[in-house]
Amino acid sequence: MPKRNTYHHGDLKATLVRTGLGIIAERGVSALSVAEVARRAGVSSGAPYRHFAGRKDLLVACAVSAARQLTGELRRARVLFEQAAGGDPDPVEATAVAAAAYTRFAAEHGSGFDLIFAGELQDAGSEELLEAGRSVMDAMLPAVLTVTDGDAKRALELLERQVAAAHGYASLLRGGFLTRRHATPEDVADHAAVIARTLSRDAQRRAEPPQSG
């Protein structure tokens, strides 16, 4: 019997992106290749080139998809937090919620800022990728800006530290280092949230004006 395609007519591009993200989740960004994506998708080696000029274009599409998924997770987490908090959400806790959502995503999908802002994509010239990356930052920056009293430089530094801790926990879990102590993405998400709270409270104290007298 002839081999059945793994995608419906017209869905090849989406199938290739999903397959590429699966490879990245298993083996990291460097493992992505057009040939491997075609093999796993069950299509000819030339089929991906109907949609992507080469590996970089495919990687851009994967990064855009990951960014949109991550933005969705961050926004959903923020909405649920704000609903639970009522009319006055704590910005420190908001950063913890974002860190937890990021950690879950990175642990489950094997990607995050390392894919969305990958160095090899910085000169890709993709407006779609730039917009997707901005959406991720827009979902995370408001809380840290509030914590730092509007100081953009310190807000970016705080966000960098929180994401580094979150991504580190996700990577260690996926690598097997934390498997015995923290068995699930939710476990490491909780720990990343603790770190985010600590960093935010410290930043909040430093943002307060010194008391006179």
Image (cartoon, rainbow, N blue to C red):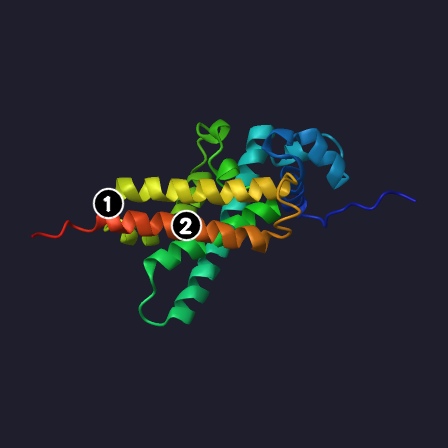
Which image quadrant is residue 175 in?
A: top right
Residue that carries the numbered disc 2 in the rendered image: 196
Residue 71: give x, y in percent of width and height: 47, 52
13 and 211: which one is in front? Answer: 211
Secondary structure category for the residue under label 2: helix
Q: Is residue 143 above or below residue 44?
A: below
Closer-to-camera residue (50/13): 13
Q: Which mark is residue 200?
A: none
Q: Quadrant of residue 13?
A: top right
Residue 201 at what x, y percent from top left?
32, 52
List the residue tagged with mark 1.
Answer: 151
Q: Is residue 137 left or right of 54 when viewed as pictured?
A: left
Q: Residue at x 43, y 49 (%)?
A: 195
- Give percent across and percent down for residue 30: 61, 29
In-image side of 56 versus 133 (left or right): right
Look at the image and tell me whether residue 71 can be seen. Answer: no
Q: CA distance from mark 2 to mark 1?
A: 18 Å
* Quarter that holds the N terminus: top right
Mark 2: few, some, or many residues within 10 Å (few <14, many ≥20)?
many
Using a 10 Å C-alpha cutoff, classify the residue at mark 1 as few (fewer than 14 neighbours), some (14 to 19) or many (20 or more).
few
Residue extending farthest front: 213
Q: Which of pointers 2 and 1 lies earlier in the amino acid sequence? A: 1
Query: Residue 12: x and y, percent?
Result: 67, 44
Find out whether the residues at labels 2 and 1 contact each other: C-beta distance under 8 Å.
no
Q: Nearer the viewer, mark 2 or mark 1?
A: 2
* Front residue (pair 190, 68): 190
Q: Residue at x 77, y 39 (%)?
A: 42
